[in-house]
Image (spheres, rainbow, N blue to C red):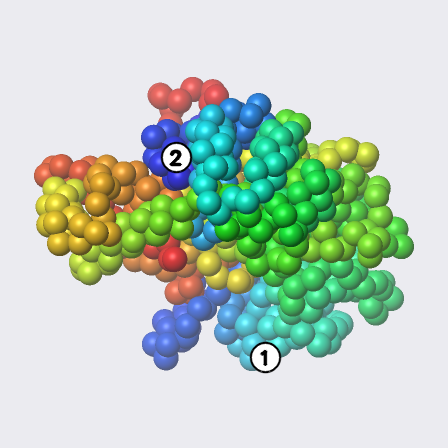
Amino acid sequence: MISHLHALFPSDPTFIDRELQRVAEEGLVRKMVVNQNAGDMVIESKDYFRILREMKHTDKASNVEAFDKFEDLLKSKPAVTRLAKEDLAEAAITEEEGIRDLLSVGFLVLSGMPGVYLISIPNVGSFLKLAFRTRKWMVNILAKTKWKEMLEKLIHERWDANVKARWREFRGVRFEWVMMEVKGGGWCEPFATPGGRGWKLTGKKE
Amino acid sequence: MYLYACYRPIYLHVNPGSRTLASYALRNYRDNTRPLCSRTNVDHVANRYMISGGSDSRISIWDLNSREGQRHRYEIVAAIPPKKGHKYGISGISWWPFDNGMFITGSFDETIKVWDTEALEEVYKFEMGARVNAHDISSVAEHCLVACAADYTAIRLIDLRSSGAAQMLSSHEGTTVNSIKWSPTDPFMLASGGSDGTVRLWDIRRSDACLTVLNLENTIGKGVIGSVKDSNLRTESFSSSSTAAFSQVKSHRGVVNGLVWLENGKKLVSTGTDEMIRVWDLAPPFTRDTNTLVNFGPLVRNRYLQCINLVLSPVRDCIPQLLFFPSDTGDILVFQVLTGVLVRRLAVSLNTRKRTCGLVCRGSEYVELFSGNSDGDIILWEAEQNLQGFGNGD
């Protein structure tokens, strides 16, 4: 998620936005905005197209050419995050054949607006849910305290306890990932205390 | 030119009656302050009087030159008590741009009133039929048009010379228009932000006045086109056939509730309830207005629909130019406008969360910042000049 990138380079968020735009236009990276509240996602193009090619040959895809046309369309519009029916039609991907397949496999997602589809990747829902739940967990922990802040050590201990208890949901997620998401997205901010780093809520609402 | 080392808050003791008002729970006492900042060299009327309006509909005029040394107490020169002027809170207040003989107030009681300062009486009253969120009057124009942003999809222009409604600019699609600002260089250009998430630029001379909608996907570089046809070219008209595509164009993913132009009229800063501040490069005609992708970081908090006063430090004062942003958490965030870097956070104390509702700066050579907060206090922020360290700024 882009929030992780922002957490890695906290001093210059403008640089990240502009670099991402530049790199997306050059075709090295694919931006995806599936849910505006959840935030933007970014994936390296080579990985994206690799997944596209792998998924081409699954059972759900009855129309392999549609996937090829989709790949060409995406490569011709490297910085785009959503497509309208007209653009898909230009690439000869029609409703019956291509779009339905792409939707069911997960490379296109319905948006609120009719005739507009969002570019996505399969199983994006579980990824976003993971990001949302871990972030919500951390925000809730801090919200229960009086001053909405807590030492990182304590949060880490609670995280470890949580991972054991709710391992189905949180498996594989490292605490650092959650911290970066929460900092880069602006939900919490770190500060220094004599006892180590502490985290505090910024007041950002869902 | 010096970089600010820090800002010191100085409390102004506001209206002596405010304590009693606070005691019967006046929520959101909102102070909108706007001094007469004359950018021309009309010194004898410049930079002296500040006018503030509150959500209890009280209006006060302060004499900023009346500060006495230690005591930090400005004198209220004139005041209109609550309920006498407007029935409900005041959403915006501005001096007549050419002298301080008149001032204009817009209020949630659906009216805009023009007042005579000497007599403290209302001279004109305009019934807008909808709560007025913001209004603005151009300081470079010869037309005396007050542009009014209300809980209504069209922007109404009121002509003060003929004391009647002049024009109606319709194009916004949402239910309200939340912020509005005239261009500081072009007397006929206007920018407005609404609940449909768009910032629109208007040229009032044209018959279909809306010039363009700022599209957040038009970024520097080759630009993103995607499904929205790239019709942000300035002179292309807003024909209804393209409205299907246009309804998807957004400047912010939320209500646009704050706007400010850079003094050269070439850039516009907007903020919305998606908690983003965006800086737009407004290109000359026939090219695209672009989102310069300046990111102001994750600390921006903006969730309320009320119009936010964004204030820029005067051009001659600080290099790089600073943007003062009143965040919902009660801090005032100070950013460098063109890079988005956070320079300072101005907070009276770390744990109180009184929202700053009005912000204005005084001075064309140096900055004194006045912020009004939801408790009814007006706070003066002064820069401490750091004589050793920062030198001549960046």
The percent coordinates of residue B310 (x first, y second) are 55, 48
Give the camera-side residue of B189 and B393: B189
Q: Quadrant of residue B38?
A: top right
- Residue at 61% x, 36% y is A65
Within 10 angstroms of label 2, few (less than 14), some, or many (20 or more) residues? many
**Which residue is denoted by mark 1 in the rendering?**
B87
The secondary element bearing badge 1 is classed as loop
- Residue at 42% x, 64% y is B374
The amino acid pointed to by label 1 is Lys
Q: Is residue A29 above or below residue B99?
A: above
Q: Is residue B385 above or below residue B352?
A: above
Subunit under mark 2: A
* Closer to viewer: mark 1 or mark 2: 2
The amino acid pointed to by label 2 is His
Give the camera-side residue of A8 and B367: A8
**Which residue is denoted by mark 2 in the rendering?**
A6
Give the camera-side residue of A98 and B36: A98
